[in-house]
Image: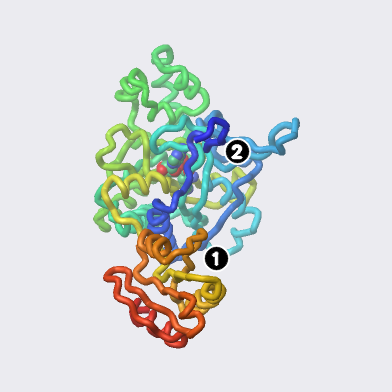
């Protein structure tokens, strides 16, 4: 590489042809599960007002404090107003309000797919630009839809042969009426250890008390051990609701583990939360996906009070798991027939032949790159792993014939142009 060549930004990835089969498999599987379940596609813009994320994800979260990419005109000296989305839920809640979706038949079930951006410290599985697929359900506040959210994620994992490799971790944060009791109990407990907490947790004490439960610092973890259990602080109503969800999952035979420390890193969550992680990943540092209920978000963004629940997964992390567990990608459609042209007469005819083959659904392409000799063109077709070469030389171009060559055994047959399509369809079983 030349010294002055520009490289990709750290933490971003090129999606290269060799990996595209994984992308296709995940996207197709995800879309099929979503569409089967009545979800409709939505695609909010990548750029939104930064205020949207500050208000929804939360002013005191890592995402807002450290990870949002701002965007402005290159020559602007004004304050930055726009941000690249760090996640979809906020934009979709904004779109729900802006497009009057509360008057649609509820629940409104939406799914999405696309890049998100976070200024994370890049490392394996943690990128600055990464793809998320996910869904949101607005206007259904039942415990049944909590379980349904797990079911559709499970269905997708099952179709990708990943269901056995992952575990659902679930928890409940209680509803609005549990909040003050929970906050008071944790404030009292953790304040006693204030001096021993890490600097981040000391700040969380005033700003984001639940996050004290999932700090990964050793000292903080020790203090967490004796903290009151979230479930004990919930009202009977919240506990019954959680129990209903768990029993529904039992009916479905979906394995889960209750993680009382699971609080998630975004502020909008209420009640039910969940994450999926590799069964063998004890570090719990990189989840494959996560989600939960956010019953106040639409109201906080200025809409009519509407409940919500959703989930998003990291596509690159799914791909890494598929590779780790040797799960096959989808095959990418490839060219089956290459046209070898020798001489100017043949060259002039070949694009017309290709056009006709395409009209009859035969994947075909000319050998390009200025290769003139038969030998070099055959070598290219061989490299491309195509089963058939159609050779048109000077003589064939004048006679209106073509030579069909089976690339596997080298057997050749001369046919008239008129017969070519039928013959190729027959050979290729198309
Ligand atoms: P999240 O847990 O922040 O939730 O992200 C969801 C998933 O995106 C993660 O589990 C992970 O697989 C992937 N992900 C996050 N950050 C990165 C990164 N830097 N590099 C690679 N992958 C990453 C949300 O985004 C919520 N909006 C989910 C949700 C939807 N909650 C309700 N509805």
In this view, the residue in front, 100 or 117, is 117
- The residue under label 1 is 105
Q: Check the picture and name the quadrant holding the C terminus.
A: bottom left
Q: Residues within 10 Å of mark 2 (few under 14, many from 20)?
A: some
213 above or below 407?
above
256 above or below 151?
above
> Which residue lies at the image location 47% right of the left edge and 80% below the top edge?
395
Circle nearer the viewer, 1 or 2? 2
Residue 217 drawn at (x, y percent)? 37, 22
**Left or right position of 263 against 3:** left
Residue 183 drawn at (x, y percent)? 45, 29
Indicate if the residue with disc 1 has its beta carbon within 8 Å of ligand 1: no
- The residue under label 2 is 55
Which of the 4 image quarters holds residue 390? bottom left
Task: Check residue 337 in the rendering and tell me which mark sits there, or answer none.
Answer: none
**Left or right position of 409 against 108:** left
Residue 42 drawn at (x, y percent)? 55, 58
Number of marks drawn: 2
Q: State whether residue 189 appears in this view.
A: yes
């Amino acid at each position: 590489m030349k010294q002055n060549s520009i490289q990709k930004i750290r933490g971003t990835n090129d999606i290269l042809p060799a990996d595209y089969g994984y992308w296709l498999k995940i996207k197709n599987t995800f879309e099929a599960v979503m569409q089967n379940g009545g979800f409709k596609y939505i695609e909010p813009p990548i750029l939104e007002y930064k205020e949207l994320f500050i208000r929804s994800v939360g002013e005191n979260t890592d995402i807002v404090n450290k990870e949002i990419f701002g965007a402005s005109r290159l020559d602007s000296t004004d304050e930055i107003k726009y941000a690249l989305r760090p996640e979809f839920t906020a934009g979709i809640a904004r779109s729900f309000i802006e497009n009057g979706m509360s008057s649609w038949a509820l629940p409104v079930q939406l799914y999405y797919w696309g890049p998100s951006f976070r200024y994370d410290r890049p490392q394996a599985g943690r990128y600055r630009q990464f793809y998320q697929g996910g869904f949101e359900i607005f206007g259904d506040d039942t415990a049944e839809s909590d379980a349904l959210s797990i079911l559709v994620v499970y269905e997708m994992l099952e179709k990708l042969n990943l269901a056995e490799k992952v575990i659902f971790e679930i928890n409940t944060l209680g509803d609005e009426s549990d909040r003050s009791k929970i906050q008071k109990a944790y404030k009292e407990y953790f304040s006693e250890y204030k001096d021993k907490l890490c600097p981040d947790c000391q700040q969380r004490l005033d700003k984001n008390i639940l996050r004290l439960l999932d700090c990964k610092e050793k000292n903080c973890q020790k203090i967490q051990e004796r903290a009151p259990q979230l479930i004990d602080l919930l009202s009977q109503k919240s506990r019954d609701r959680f129990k209903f969800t768990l029993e529904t999952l039992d009916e479905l035979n979906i394995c889960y583990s209750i993680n009382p420390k699971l609080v998630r890193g975004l502020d909008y969550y209420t009640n039910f939360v969940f994450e999926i992680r590799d069964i063998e990943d004890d570090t719990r540092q990189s989840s494959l996906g996560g989600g939960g209920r956010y019953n106040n978000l639409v109201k906080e963004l200025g809409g009519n009070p509407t409940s919500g629940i959703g989930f998003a997964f990291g596509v690159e992390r799914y791909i890494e798991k598929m590779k780790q567990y040797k799960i096959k990608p989808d095959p990418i459609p490839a060219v089956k027939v290459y046209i070898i042209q020798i001489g100017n007469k043949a060259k002039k005819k070949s694009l017309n032949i290709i056009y006709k083959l395409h009209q009859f659904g035969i994947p075909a392409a000319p050998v390009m790159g200025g290769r003139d000799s038969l030998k070099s063109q055959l070598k290219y077709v061989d490299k491309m792993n195509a089963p058939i070469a159609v050779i048109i030389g000077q003589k064939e171009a004048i006679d209106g014939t073509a030579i069909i060559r089976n690339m596997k055994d080298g057997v050749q047959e001369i046919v008239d142009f008129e017969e070519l399509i039928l013959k190729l369809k027959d050979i290729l079983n198309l």
